[in-house]
Image (cartoon, rainbow, N blue to C red):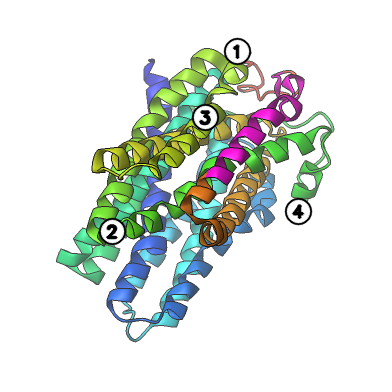
């Protein structure tokens, strides 16, 4: 692997870690701390409001695209957002949950607003600096950053909080965010983006035009369904382990540390496989893996739930989810219009987030009504449905390099046309 490629991947990994570790801390560890401090479940529920900017970030994504004509200008957005992100995290450390709960919630929302803006710019930055053949492995870095961030943000930081306390932890998080920016500050292999042939400026409602593209409906349905066969299992795995009699400490290790570690590790082979085989040949692998996961969990309900079987199931679940993420991100990078990279990629990721949210909510109701075996069976059915629909939803010509109008490097170099 060439030095320039390694530099790109390392830069992207650091950027996704910079956003994911604090985000994971705020969304998963803060509720635990609040519960320890005897906060009501209603108050803890309000914490979920901090995720709102990540659901509606497509609204200001056109602004980021409109003001950025190269990866260097996207870097400006990244640095500005992350410095502000670090400053807000640092300031939160001076407040306490006992006396400043509302203030902390407001600051968290502001922090996530900055983080969401950084994510828009980082995704566009990644699309520009990565050649076509590099994107699969580049998306491995994105997924790995998310899973490693979840591992540290929801596991390791809780332990650090136990020993250090609130103020040192928050200030350390802010310093970490700044340190993570060092690779992008010194990144030099920038690329300009080529505007679309219509020469139309990026509109404030650019996301509307995204949905007007020909054949976009099948792609959006594919994105909406792709995770559906395992998200319900992923959502219910911790309650499932609780009902099997595992204590919180054990569950935290099995799912929070072991599971996410498996996911982070499997992003690398997924990226290499997609790079070597291309999107078309990779298309069937990941949905089939998701189906096998559902089959395994149905099998698990007929066993005595020996510990090694639980570990195998969790490893399969997180690995399948991580590998599917790499494929979805790589596929999404194909469906971006020139000059609208941040907007278009953001919209696609929001679609997957909304799908996951719907499936997660419904999984609880299904598990209540039909039990875990019933939930796993329905997830298996959804997995088979996706396999049946794949030939109708995935249109090779829609994702071809020529059809998607690839970006050029300084107006001269065309990306590789490997598919």
> How far is mark 4 from mark 1, CA to CA?
34 Å
Residue 338's spot in the image, x, y percent?
71, 32
- Residue indicated by mark 3: 190
Numbered disc 1: secondary structure: loop
Residue 155's spot in the image, x, y percent?
28, 54
First reached walking from the N terminus: tag 4 or tag 1: 4
Residue 204, which numbered label? 4
Residues marked 1 and 2 touching at CB (< 8 Å): no
Q: Is residue 365 above or below residue 200?
A: below
The answer to whether residue 313 is seen in the rendering is yes
The range drawn in magenta is 377-401
Q: Nearer the viewer, mark 4 or mark 2?
A: 2
- Give the residue displayed 71% in from the left and 26% down from the top: 394
Q: Is residue 266 above or below residue 95?
A: above
Nearest the camera: 373 or 57? 373
> How far is mark 4 from mark 2, CA to CA?
52 Å
82 vs 180, left or right, is right
Nearest the camera: 302 or 342? 302
- Residue indicated by mark 1: 418
Residues marked 2 and 3 touching at CB (< 8 Å): no
Numbered disc 2: secondary structure: loop
First reached walking from the N terminus: tag 4 or tag 2: 4
> How far is mark 3 from mark 1, CA to CA?
22 Å
Residues marked 4 and 3 touching at CB (< 8 Å): no
Q: Quadrant of the C terminus?
A: top right
Crowding near the residue tagged with mark 3, few <14, some 14–19, many ≥20 C-alpha atoms within 10 Å: some
Q: Nearer the viewer, mark 4 or mark 1?
A: 1
Residue 291's spot in the image, x, y percent?
53, 33
- Residue indicated by mark 2: 245
């Amino acid at each position: 692997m060439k030095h320039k490629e390694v530099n790109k991947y390392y830069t992207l990994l650091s950027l996704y870690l910079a956003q994911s570790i604090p985000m994971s801390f705020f969304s998963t560890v803060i509720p635990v701390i609040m519960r320890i401090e005897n906060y009501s479940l209603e108050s803890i529920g309000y914490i979920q409001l901090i995720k709102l900017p990540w659901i509606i970030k497509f609204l200001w994504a056109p602004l980021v695209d409109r003001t950025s004509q190269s990866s260097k200008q996207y870097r400006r957005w990244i640095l500005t957002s992350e410095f502000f992100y670090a400053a807000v995290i640092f300031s939160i450390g001076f407040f306490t949950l006992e006396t400043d709960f509302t203030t902390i919630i407001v600051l968290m929302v502001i922090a996530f607003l900055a983080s969401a803006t950084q994510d828009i710019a980082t995704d566009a930055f990644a699309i520009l600096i990565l050649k076509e053949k590099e994107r699969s492995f580049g998306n491995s870095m994105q997924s790995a950053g998310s899973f490693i961030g979840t591992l540290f943000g929801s596991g390791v930081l809780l332990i650090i909080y136990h020993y250090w306390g609130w103020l040192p932890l928050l200030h350390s998080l802010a310093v970490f965010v700044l340190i993570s920016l060092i690779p992008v500050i010194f990144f030099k292999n920038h690329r300009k983006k080529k505007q679309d042939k219509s020469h139309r400026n990026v509109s404030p409602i650019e996301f509307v035009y995204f949905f007007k593209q020909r054949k976009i409906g099948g792609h959006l349905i594919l994105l909406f369904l792709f995770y559906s066969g395992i998200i319900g299992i992923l959502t219910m795995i911790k309650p499932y382990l609780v009902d099997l009699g595992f204590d919180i400490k054990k569950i935290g290790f099995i799912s929070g540390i072991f599971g996410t570690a498996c996911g982070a590790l499997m992003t690398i082979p997924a990226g290499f496989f997609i790079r070597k085989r291309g999107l078309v040949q990779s298309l069937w692998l990941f949905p089939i893996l998701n189906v096998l996961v559902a089959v395994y969990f149905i099998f698990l309900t007929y066993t005595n739930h020996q510990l090694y079987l639980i570990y195998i199931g969790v490893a399969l679940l997180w690995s399948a989810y991580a590998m599917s993420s790499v494929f979805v991100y790589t596929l999404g990078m194909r469906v971006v219009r020139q000059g609208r990279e941040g907007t278009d990629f953001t919209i696609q990721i929001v679609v997957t987030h909304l799908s996951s949210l719907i499936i997660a909510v419904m999984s609880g109701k299904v598990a209540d009504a039909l039990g875990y075996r019933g939930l796993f069976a329905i997830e298996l059915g959804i997995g088979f449905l996706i396999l049946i629909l794949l030939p109708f939803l995935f249109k090779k010509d829609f994702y071809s390099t020529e059809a998607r109008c690839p970006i050029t490097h300084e107006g001269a170099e065309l990306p590789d046309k490997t598919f």
